[in-house]
């Protein structure tokens, strides 16, 4: 019989455990696992995950998307901007310069405009846009 202490579970399980749309832990008949909650909505960690998913889709589509290399470069730069906000929030010491909000918003605008007509990307662009607005302001 499985036992639980907070987010840690131990024992025999007769079904895979699905957490945040992902199978987590040993899905055999027994094992230990820890449930990690999904990043809070609107958090920089969630935005980094959304940008990573978008990047993977654009990279997989490759030359099928016009200017895909430019899009990938902008996604990488925007991801670095988001990660830099994590560093300044965590340390508070100013060691990592805070990204310029206007620059981050401009990168996102460029990505959206370049992806505008493509049907090969299914990432949640609206959710990414909302997260960018929450993190960097709506300008």
Image (spheres, grey):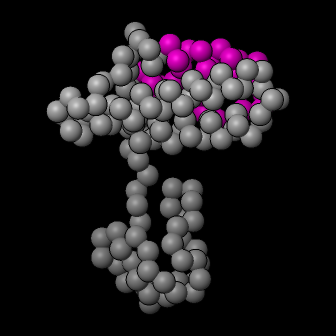
| Residue 129: % across, % down | 51, 24
Q: Nearer the viewer, residue 131 or 85?
A: 85
| Residue 134: % across, % down | 38, 25
| Main secondary structure of the magenta stretch | helix
Residue 122 in view in this figure? no
Residue in the picture at 81% in, 29% down: 63
Residue in the picture at 25% in, 35% down: 89
Among the 4 quarters of the image, the one containing residue 68? top right
7 vs 70: above or below: below
27 vs 77: above or below: below
User: Is residue 127 highlighted in magenta?
Assistant: yes
Q: Is residue 70 left or right of residue 76?
A: right
Q: Residue furthest top?
A: 139
Q: Residue furthest front?
A: 95
1 vs 40: above or below: below
Residue in the picture at 52% in, 67% down: 24
Q: Is residue 65 left or right of residue 104?
A: right
User: Is residue 23 highlighted in magenta?
Assistant: no
Which quarter of the image is occupied by the N terminus? bottom left
Q: Nearer the viewer, residue 97 or 127?
A: 97
Q: Is residue 42 left or right of residue 17?
A: left
Q: Which residues are magenta?
A: 106-133
Residue 4 in view in this figure? yes
| Residue 139: % across, % down | 40, 9
């Amino acid at each position: 019989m499985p036992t639980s202490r907070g987010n840690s579970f131990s024992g025999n399980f007769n079904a895979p455990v699905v957490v945040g749309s992902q199978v987590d832990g040993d899905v055999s008949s027994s094992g230990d696992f820890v449930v990690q909650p999904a990043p809070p909505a609107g958090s920089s960690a969630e935005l980094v995950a959304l940008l990573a998913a978008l990047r993977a889709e654009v990279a997989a589509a490759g030359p099928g998307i016009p200017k895909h290399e430019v899009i990938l470069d902008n996604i990488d730069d925007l991801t670095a901007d988001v990660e830099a906000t994590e560093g300044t929030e965590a340390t508070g010491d100013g060691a990592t310069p805070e990204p310029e909000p206007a620059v981050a918003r401009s990168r996102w605008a460029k990505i959206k405009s370049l992806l505008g007509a493509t049907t090969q990307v299914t990432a949640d662009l609206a959710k990414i846009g909302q997260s960018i607005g929450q993190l960097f302001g709506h300008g």
